[in-house]
């Protein structure tokens, strides 16, 4: 085989030389390994989110107006007629413009996956009065 024939055989993907097939196979194997590694990372991230990320519940409410309201407290119990415990450290403030509607939310991170909780919302008025609404029922997933 002369030099030209050797170069042609090396660059020809249809060649039957063992070195060429091995290089092609290695490239495919590397691609498969990289694809598998990415797939495993995605699976691991999904497992982390589903099983290791701490559960939480987000309670949202909307008001039509907040006249004479200074803020809100949330209370939680493990049954609808159970003992409700205040879970807000500070008063969730009312909107600065009491004549407008407002959206509020609170994220409860002190929950256990699979457990159902009951929440009551306390509206605290400027005169010191308060009014309770609820309960609502939520299950941590």
Image: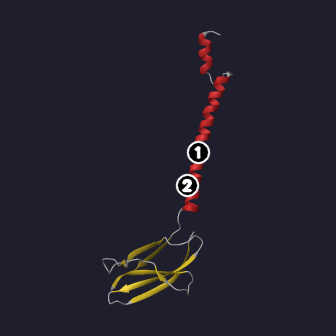
**Position of residue 59 measured from the top left corner of the image (x, y, whole percent):** 47, 74
* Closer to us: 92 or 101: 92
Q: Is residue 115 visible?
A: yes
Q: Within 10 angstroms of label 1, few (less than 14), some, or many (20 or more) residues?
A: few
Q: Relative to 14, does residue 91 appear above or below in the rendering?
A: below
Name the quadrant of the N terminus: top right
Left or right position of 80 against 75: right
Residue bearing mark 2: 45
**Position of residue 114 measured from the top left corner of the image (x, y, whole percent):** 60, 71
Label placed on residue 88: none
What colour scheme does the image use?
A: secondary structure
Q: Residue at x 40, y 74 (%)?
A: 103
Residue bearing mark 1: 37
Left or right position of 64 against 48: left
Q: Within 10 angstroms of label 2, few (less than 14), some, or many (20 or more) residues?
A: few
Name the quadrant of the C terminus: bottom right
Q: Is residue 66 visible?
A: no
Q: Relative to 3, does residue 114 appear above or below in the rendering?
A: below
Report the number of discs.
Answer: 2
């Amino acid at each position: 085989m002369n030099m030209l024939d050797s170069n042609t055989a090396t660059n020809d993907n249809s060649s039957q030389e063992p070195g060429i097939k091995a290089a092609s196979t290695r490239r495919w194997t590397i691609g498969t390994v990289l694809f598998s590694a990415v797939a495993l990372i995605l699976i691991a991230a999904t497992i982390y989110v589903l099983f290791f990320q701490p559960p939480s519940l987000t309670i949202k409410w909307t008001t039509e107006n907040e006249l004479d309201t200074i803020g809100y407290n949330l209370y939680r119990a493990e049954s609808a007629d159970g003992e409700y415990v205040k879970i807000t450290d500070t008063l969730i403030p009312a909107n600065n413009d009491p004549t407008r509607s407002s959206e509020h939310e609170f994220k409860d991170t002190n929950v256990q996956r699979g457990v159902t909780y009951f929440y009551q919302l306390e509206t605290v008025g400027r005169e010191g009065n308060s009014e309770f609404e609820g309960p609502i029922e939520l299950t941590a997933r």
